[in-house]
Image: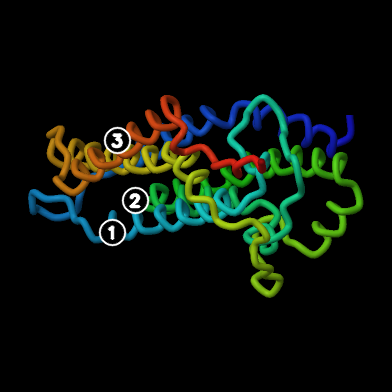
Amino acid sequence: MAMYEECVQSGQWLFQRRGWLPIAGVALLLTQVGPVPGTARAIPVAWPLICLGISIIGLLMRAYTVGCAAPGTSGRNRGGQVAESLNTTGAYSLVRHPLYVANAVMWLGPLLYPRSPWAAVVLALVFWLYYERIMFAEEEFLRGKYGQAFVDWASTTPAFLPNFRHWTPSRIPFNLRVVLRREYSGLLLVVLLFAALNALEWWVSFHEWRLDPLWAWALGVGTVVATVLRGLRRGTRLLEDRQPAAEP
């Protein structure tokens, strides 16, 4: 089997398991949390807030990409590739894989939190290899389905590093319902991870299991918001797209 086919095949395997495979990276990240320098019995808040801000930027990037994506695209499906149309405007006019760029920014915050350069570099490389294979699989699928249209778009749009000179406004209006319906789990993941990092930092620094009020508040709000949105998605039609009324 040629290397290209191997990359595509491994990418398909990773795509179907992308929901739980990053857990290994989280486990490695948590092992890098070290004690707080100095003698003060407190966890500095400035650096963690900077890291959280980076992750929020990633979440906002995901929200814009998902909110302006055409129906039947940019989903969280894991059984196989789905693309009812080829996205080429909005975020997709800057880069071919805007959701993975957003994921990279979202994960950069927790990676920087422990202040461990080697761990950040190693995990960033693992992240790149992991998503590179998935991108191979996705692009092979799009090439097979859309042919020359995909080739033309890919020839002028970079895979991962955005080119802002090619910006084209999205042809799809931003849909907040889609974002609320699909992205609450990302918010919950971020607050859970930062709360875990804070609790672990307290333990390795002072041998005490606790959360700073900021992270306890963030965890509580994030959990409530995610729970409410999940309930609305599963039990009501409030987050579904409104269909136009039938003409008489």
Q: Which amino acid does label 1 sit on?
A: Trp
- Name the residue rendered at 25%, 42% in the picture: 221
Q: Whole-percent x and y of residue 3?
A: 84, 37
User: In the image, which is nearer the foreground, mark 2 or mark 3?
Assistant: 3
Q: Residue furthest bottom?
A: 165
Q: Nearer the viewer, residue 178 or 148?
A: 178
Circle 3 SS class: helix
Question: Do residues under tags 1 and 2 come within 8 Å of each other at their CB atoms?
Answer: yes
Going by the numbered disc 2, the residue's amino acid type is Tyr
Image quadrant containing the N terminus? top right
Q: How far apart are marks 2 and 3 (CA)?
A: 21 Å
Q: How many marks?
A: 3
Residue 127 vertical placement versus 171 (above, below): above
Instruction: Say which residue label 3 marks.
Output: 223
Residue annotated with mark 1: 47
Badge 1 or badge 2: first in the primary sequence: 1
The residue wearing badge 2 is 113
Describe residue 206's horizontal placement relative to residue 134 as left or right. Answer: left
Residue 183's spot in the image, x, y percent? 47, 42
Residue found farthest to the right: 148
Name the residue type under label 3. Answer: Thr
Quarter where residue 89 is shown = bottom right
Q: Position of residue 194 (x, y in %)?
A: 31, 43
Query: What whole-number distance in Å separates the C-alpha atoms at marks 1 and 2?
Result: 7 Å
